[in-house]
Amino acid sequence: MLCSADEEVRTLSDPDEARDDEFIDELRGLTARFDPTPAWVTQAAREAYTWRTIDAELAALTYDSALEDAATSGVRGVATGEVLSFETAEVTVDVEVSPAPRNRRRLVAQLAPAQAAQVEVRHREGTTSATADPLGRFVVDGLPTGPMSLRCRLVSGGELATEWTTL
Amino acid sequence: MGELVRAAGDGDAQAWNALVEQFSGLVWAVVRGHRLRDADAADVVQTTWLRLVEHLGAIRDADRVGAWLVTTARRESLRVLQRGSRQLPTEDVGLEVGDPVPGPEALAVAADSDRALWRGLAQLPQRCRTLLRVLAADPPPSYAAVSAGLGLPIGSIGPTRARCLAQLRAMLARSDLTNDGGPV
């Protein structure tokens, strides 16, 4: 096998590593044939950019009952909803996700501290509007599965967006 | 690459597209390494990119963005897997959440050795499968991104890779023995 001086040095010092490099290259070739990134998945990634917002404060996902259950008990939970919590420095959004007919999802959410808000649910099919009552509660039904983010315009002023999360 | 991240953060859609071009294969490799079936895999990939859109302002470095994408895709894959396992009856878990059946047409016409290698990869334990899929992403990721994204010290990537590939070779050797019924 012909190689450059550099490669030769490395090959001599660690033939196993060179052999592993070749094996990985072979796997790369197989991946390209058997499981390439679907073009529409890459196209959707390009289009993600159109959701860019710069004015809302980001509320990070801080709690997920699915992960919590797995970590604490190792026991599969019953089919109650999954509970997610998102937080900014000032506001918490608790969201219970439950199944709705035809593989849709229902959200029951609560803002704390309690306050009214205009809510826009962003999802793969577009946006769905909702209104949080003065106690900070709102319900959204019939959402598609897939990525979801809540954008809340608070009556106290200010705007937050929850981190995108897969429903 | 840092320039691209900055430019995308400032509203340059072409810079964003260049980032997608660079890392699309890597993100796909992570979710497939977790054996997510097609619909879930696509959802997790999309969530990962949407999260990057909202975090652009906070990431300022090329290798960091690769690592960040791997970490985010890995966590979200685990979330979806965990949730899926809650919703499916136990007896279906292996089937439903298990092997996606990627590229059946391509597989059908592939050489036996390629097919055996691909199946062997799918049967490796998750840690190995994810590491090898990520290393075999196109274009190849930096070791820094693999290290930070998968939580492996840089120095242990080579040895871990060697162990995983040895396991894969052993698996292929066994299937050769089983299948060797005479001259082909």
Image: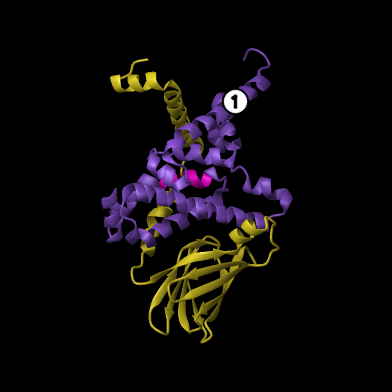
Q: Name above or below for residue B50 compared with residue B26.
A: below
Which percent across, then down, holds residue A156?
41, 84
> Magenta segment, principal secondary structure?
helix
Q: In which quarter of the image is residue A5?
A: top left
**Does residue A65 belong to the magenta stretch?**
no
Which percent across, then down, holds residue A153?
42, 79
Q: For the residue marked with disc 1, what is the amino acid?
A: Ala
* Residue at the top extreme, as displayed: B183
In the picture of the structure, the residue carrying the numbered disc 1 is B170
Query: Residue at coordinates 37% horizontally, 72% vertically from top-left?
Result: A56
Which chain identifier belongs to the purple chain? Answer: B
* Residue at the bottom extreme, as displayed: A134
* Pointer 1 chain: B
Is B135 left or right of B9, judged from the image as shown? Answer: right
Please provide the residue range marked out in magenta.
B24-32
Which percent across, then down, holds residue A74?
67, 55
